[in-house]
Amino acid sequence: MLTLPLAALSGQQAQPASSAAPRYKAPEVRDTGDLKGPRQPIFFRHDIHANQDQIPCMYCHYSASIASEPGIPSLQTCIGCHQLVGGSTPSHQAEIKKVRDAWRERKPPEWIRIHALPGFVKFPHMRHIKRLGTNACITCHGDVKTMPQVSQVSTLKMGWCVRCHVENKVSRDCSVCHY
């Protein structure tokens, strides 16, 4: 059973484990037009959630360890925290209002997919997490905890994938990814 992140339990941002380490503070973004990646229906800040508030990737993307296609976290996951956490700035509050409105209207946002593979390629997330660990997401998705808006950083082309298989000493049999 998952428990709510500390930030959600208190309605505040997560506090550092030690006051000696400087705490990351996400920059305020006033215009998303200059950011890499597609504009989404809700400006979801991975840099705030994963870095500033220190919410582990697997809290929201929990199905990645058990499913081939983990997909986007459900709106229920978002509202689990954002029924309490309202945002610290007017721009954050406006985006959280979109989450709450979507929940109330029972209409999840229509997210724009960022990382997509051709239909003839299978990428079982659970197999990769089992072999490489829950922090391996950065290998394909980049360091999303530093991204105000997520964009694709890896080519995800066959040569790129084969190189990773070689480096990690895992199978290069075609049927592993093409079935």
Image (spheres, rainbow, N blue to C red):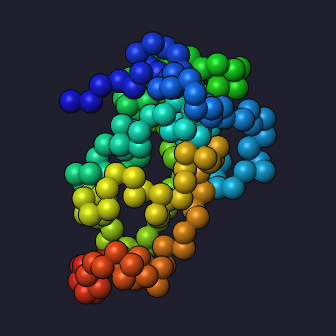
Could you tell me which residue is drawn at 55 percent across and 54 percent down? 143
Determine if residue 176 is in view: yes
- Residue 77 horizontal side relative to residue 116, left or right: left
Residues 50 and 67: in front is 50
Where residue 132 sits, quadrant-wise, is: bottom left
Count of residue discs: 0
Above or below, 31 against 125 in this view is: above
- Residue 156 horizontal side relative to residue 38, left or right: left
Residue 90 percent across, percent down from the top left: 71, 20
- Residue 153 horizontal side relative to residue 118, left or right: right
Quadrant of the drawing holding the N terminus: top left
Above or below, 119 against 124 in this view is: below
Residue 83 percent across, percent down from the top left: 45, 16
Residue 112 percent across, percent down from the top left: 54, 52
Where residue 121 sits, quadrant-wise, is: bottom left
Residue 42 percent across, percent down from the top left: 59, 37
Could you tell me which residue is drawn at 47 percent across and 57 percent down? 138
Residues 64 and 17: in front is 17
- Residue 103 horizontal side relative to residue 24, left or right: left
Where residue 108 sits, quadrant-wise, is: top left
Could you tell me which residue is drawn at 37 percent across and 31 percent down? 77
Quadrant of the drawing holding the C terminus: bottom left
Could you tell me which residue is drawn at 36 percent across and 29 percent down? 76
Residues 110 and 53: in front is 53
Determine if residue 44 is in view: no
